[in-house]
Image (cartoon, rainbow, N blue to C red):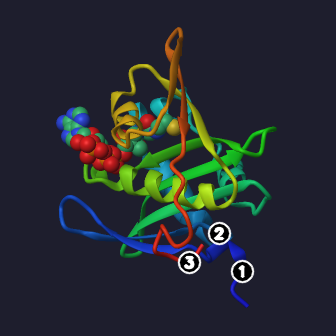
């Protein structure tokens, strides 16, 4: 029987014509997830984790991949190479989920982040999540642009260098993601 950790799958065309596979990440993807994060530029690591220090890849991999209720991690694959991840974790209020994402530096600005966030929202919405929240560095113009380009209603508040983002997810309805969830 297929484990629930690998049920989502969809393909998306990037701005440069590449076709990427989006699928749910599972424990078999541990090395790919570790490699993606190991190869982040210092700046991207800072934007993602708010630190320039090396990230403990074991902790990161288990936090992202260990199956747990209310958590979901999606990966974008160019062939065998994992080029981006987006994940959510539901909060105390099960209709609200914290999100985080990262795309390999050489694959920025090709639409990977946009494709991941759109699909993650569709998946989350079918699982009862109504709002994504994220704390993003106010300097992270790219992430703020990716989030705002969808035009989803929400709020943005600044707390010093950090911007707290709240996004109300669109109601997708059955079959909206065109993929198995
Ligand atoms: C934020 C991040 C995930 C975005 O991923 P991405 O794959 O580069 O994003 P996309 O290519 O989907 O979208 C980039 C947007 O920037 C726009 N863009 C394109 N060229 C640009 C440029 N030179 N300058 C600014 N914006 C540009 C694109 O138009 C696109 O907007 P669109 O939705 O209108 O098409 C990625 O930059 C990243 O991994 N950053 C480091 C980690 C991080 O910041 N994570 C978020 C905090 S959790």
Q: Quadrant of the N terminus?
A: bottom right
Residue 124 in view, yes or no = yes
Report the mark closest to the observer, 3 or 1: 3
Q: Which residue is mark 2?
A: 26
> In which quadrant is the C terminus drawn?
bottom right
Rendered view: 38 above or below 79: above
Q: Residue at x 57, y 33 (%)?
A: 134
Callout 3–callout 1 Cβ contact below 8 Å: no
Residue marked by disc 3 = 180
Label 1, on which residue? Answer: 3
- Locate residue 44 relative to residue 135 in the image: left or right: left
Q: Secondary structure at mark 2?
A: loop
| Relative image position of residue 72 (x, y in whole percent) | 65, 58
Circle 3 SS class: loop
Q: Are marks 2 and 1 in contact (CB under 8 Å)?
A: yes
Pick whichever, 46 or 108, lies toward us: 108
Of badges 2 and 3, nearer the viewer stands 3
The x and y percentages for residue 161 are: 49, 13
For marks 2 and 3, give the CA distance: 16 Å
Instruction: Check disc 1 and report its element: helix, strand or loop.
Output: loop
Q: Nearer the viewer, mark 2 or mark 1?
A: 1
Q: Earlier in the sequence, mark 2 or mark 3?
A: 2
Q: Residue furthest left?
A: 16
Query: Neighbour class for label 2 at 10 Å: few (<14), some, many (≥20)?
Result: many
Identified at 59% across, 42% down, the residue is: 99
- The vertical placement of 45 against 172, above or below, is above
Residue at left offset 48%, top offset 59%: 119
Q: Position of residue 65 (x, y in %)?
A: 68, 60
Q: Is residue 64 left or right of residue 83?
A: right
Indicate which disc residue 104 carries.
Answer: none
User: What's the CA distance linking mark 2 and mark 1?
Assistant: 9 Å
């Amino acid at each position: 029987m297929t484990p629930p950790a690998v049920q989502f799958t969809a393909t998306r065309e990037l701005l440069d014509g590449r076709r990427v596979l989006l699928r749910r990440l599972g424990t078999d993807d541990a090395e790919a997830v570790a490699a993606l994060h190991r190869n982040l530029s210092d700046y991207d690591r800072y934007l993602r984790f708010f630190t320039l220090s090396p990230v403990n890849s074991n902790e990161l991999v288990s936090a992202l991949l260990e199956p747990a209720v209310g958590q979901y991690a999606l990966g974008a694959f160019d062939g065998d190479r994992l080029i981006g991840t987006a994940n959510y974790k539901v909060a105390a209020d099960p209709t609200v989920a914290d999100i985080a994402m990262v795309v390999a530096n050489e694959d920025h600005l090709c639409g990977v982040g946009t494709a991941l966030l759109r699909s993650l929202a569709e998946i989350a919405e079918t699982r009862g999540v109504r709002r994504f929240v994220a704390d993003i560095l106010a300097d992270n113009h790219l992430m703020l642009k990716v989030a705002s380009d969808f035009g989803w209603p929400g709020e943005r508040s600044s707390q010093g260098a950090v911007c707290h983002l709240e996004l109300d997810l669109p109601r997708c309805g059955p079959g909206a993601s065109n993929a198995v969830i």
